[in-house]
Image (spheres, rainbow, N blue to C red):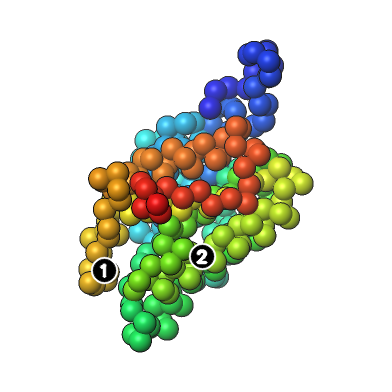
Amino acid sequence: MGPSMSTQTGPASRPRDRHCAQDGSRHALVTGCASGIGAAITARLLAGGWRVTGVDLRAPRQDPPGDFRYAQADLAATDEVLRLCANCPDVDALVHAAGFMRVNPVGAFRPEDGEAMWRVHVQAAETLIDALAARMPDGGRIVLIGSRTAAGAARRGQYAATKAALLGLARSCAAELAPRGVTVNVVAPGATDTPMLADPTRGGSPPRLPPIGRFIRTDEIAELVAYLLGPYAAAITGQQIVVCGGGSL
């Protein structure tokens, strides 16, 4: 993402919007900033000149280099999310990457697990979008981190249901916000090399290695998110982009 330019670079001019600036004026709110995909997205945006407000229940072990501010919030608690939004400066982009998995087979669903995942994955996304989208400038960006599992996976029904709901939310919001140039998309990773892979709550449901022979890297997801927040992704909205290393084939 280079700086704004008014000169021609071939048949078409480069996009001119505030997302091109490299002066630190762009501000993103990223949830789940303390580890995994959220941490990788935070680092990538800071390296690209963004100011980042990182949200998590626990602070990162150390602040990443760049213009970073940590805001503590329990994303399962709507009142805390609303307070976070009220105290947060206006944002150019929202990335909701916070999440966790509870694995239960049919016949052993735990309502408390389903509700807990819904609150963090879907309800927090609803609250954040509802509170922040109206304050975004035209051309703002929203990215929700979903999962390839949204298409269905054994023993992951409750988790998959919450991630599948994100697409309906994203497409509906995208339709409403498109006239302002605000895009809303879902990035749906397959098995990604994060602490979630070793989470003991997965029980007897270990991750499957994708056909490419390795797990997805967090920096690969972060790079895609950075692109979706940039000027060349202005025509991409209401989409779910699956990054699965061939796992969907």
Question: Helix or strand or loop: what does disc 1 sit on?
Answer: loop
At 64% from the left edge and 38% from the top edge, which residue is drawn?
234
Instruction: Single out the residue that lies furthest toward the front.
Output: 249
Residue 172: in sight, yes or no? yes
Alpha-carbon neighbours of circle 2 within 10 Å: few (<14), some, or many (≥20)? some
Residue nearer the viewer, 13 or 149? 149
At 49% from the left edge and 38% from the top edge, which residue is drawn?
226
At 43% from the left edge and 67% from the top edge, which residue is drawn?
152
Question: Helix or strand or loop: what does disc 2 sit on?
Answer: helix
Picture quadrant of residue 159: bottom left
Residue designated by label 2: 164
90 relative position to 143: left or right = right
* Residue 64, horizontal then vertical, whole percent: 36, 40
* Residue 20, horizontal then vertical, whole percent: 59, 28
* Residue 8, horizontal then vertical, whole percent: 67, 13
Residue nearer the viewer, 76 or 85? 76
> Mark 2 is on which residue type?
Ala
How many labels sit on residues? 2
Residue designated by label 1: 205
